[in-house]
Image (spheres, rainbow, N blue to C red):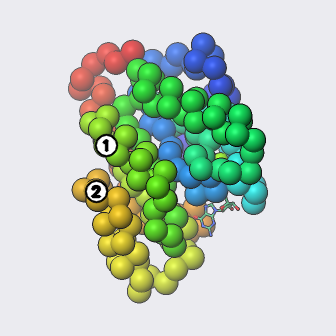
Amino acid sequence: MRLRFLQSAMAFESWPVTGMPEVALFGRSNAGKSSLINALAQARVARISREPGRTRTLNFYAGDGIVLVDLPGYGYSHMSKEQQRRQTAVLERYAERRAALCGAVQLVDIRHRPSELDILWHDFLLRRGEPLLLLLGKSDQVGRGSWRSREREIVETLGTDAPVVFWSARTLEGKRALETFLDEIRKRQASLGQFT
Ligand SMILES: Nc1nc2c(ncn2[C@@H]2O[C@H](COP(=O)(O)OP(=O)(O)OP(=O)(O)O)[C@@H](O)[C@H]2O)c(=O)[nH]1
Ligand SMILES: [Mg+2]
């Protein structure tokens, strides 16, 4: 899908007013959120790096009637306590207050059992009661033969009935399903009318 960078922001006052439904990417640091933006856009619109903790601000992208937000990852320990506290506060504030937010994508690494923070954020997003898609990312890193058992462990750990999609920014596994999810949110919001 076409995606263009809109704005980078931290403070509530500078979050853009777009008039479009918004979907945010949640996931621990290094899960591959920024890479997902680039994979969807098929262009280098987001900055990525090998070192975790790269994304420090909320990054807004617009495409095809929807806004995607690349959020800073949670659970990045290599920063000061004060920085961590500030980052968590921004994430929570965004997730609680953002009126345009009508859906979420949570990205977890298929190779690992979800962390305590993954579980907390998953529960939080479920409680919002809006569409939530769980992506099992970096699926290119494990053989297809073990996908189902990885899925089972992750779903059991999260105790969830959210829809699950295998994802890879490298092979673009899951891209179609992700685009369908975004499309459904756009249609759902259009039928509900104004949201901001
Ligand atoms: N093999 C593989 N590597 C990936 C995939 N997606 C991302 N990566 C790599 O994982 C690392 C982190 O990716 P980012 O996209 O920066 O992760 P992030 O979730 O934005 O991280 P923060 O900004 O710290 O929250 C980079 O080295 C990426 O190249 C994937 O699908 N497969
Ligand atoms: Mg990032």
**Label 1 Cα crowd, 10 Å radius (few <14 / some 14-19 / many 20+):** some
Point out residue 6 in the picture as x, y percentages from the top left corner.
63, 28
Res. 30 in view: yes
Res. 187 in view: no
Residue to which mark 1 is pinned: 126
How far is the residue under mark 1 from the one under mark 2?
9 Å
**Label 2 Cα crowd, 10 Å radius (few <14 / some 14-19 / many 20+):** some
Furthest residue in direction front, as rendered:
81
Would you say 90 lies left or right of 64 here? right
In the image, 21 versus 52, the foreground residue is 52
Residue to which mark 2 is pinned: 160
Corner quadrant of residue 129: top left
Point out residue 21 in the picture as x, y percentages from the top left corner.
41, 28
Q: Residue at x 58, y 36 (%)?
A: 88
Q: Are marks 1 and 2 in contact (CB under 8 Å)?
A: yes
Q: Residue at x 25, y 56 (%)?
A: 161
Corner quadrant of residue 170: bottom right
Would you say 112 lies left or right of 179 here? right
Point out residue 17 in the picture as x, y percentages from the top left corner.
52, 16
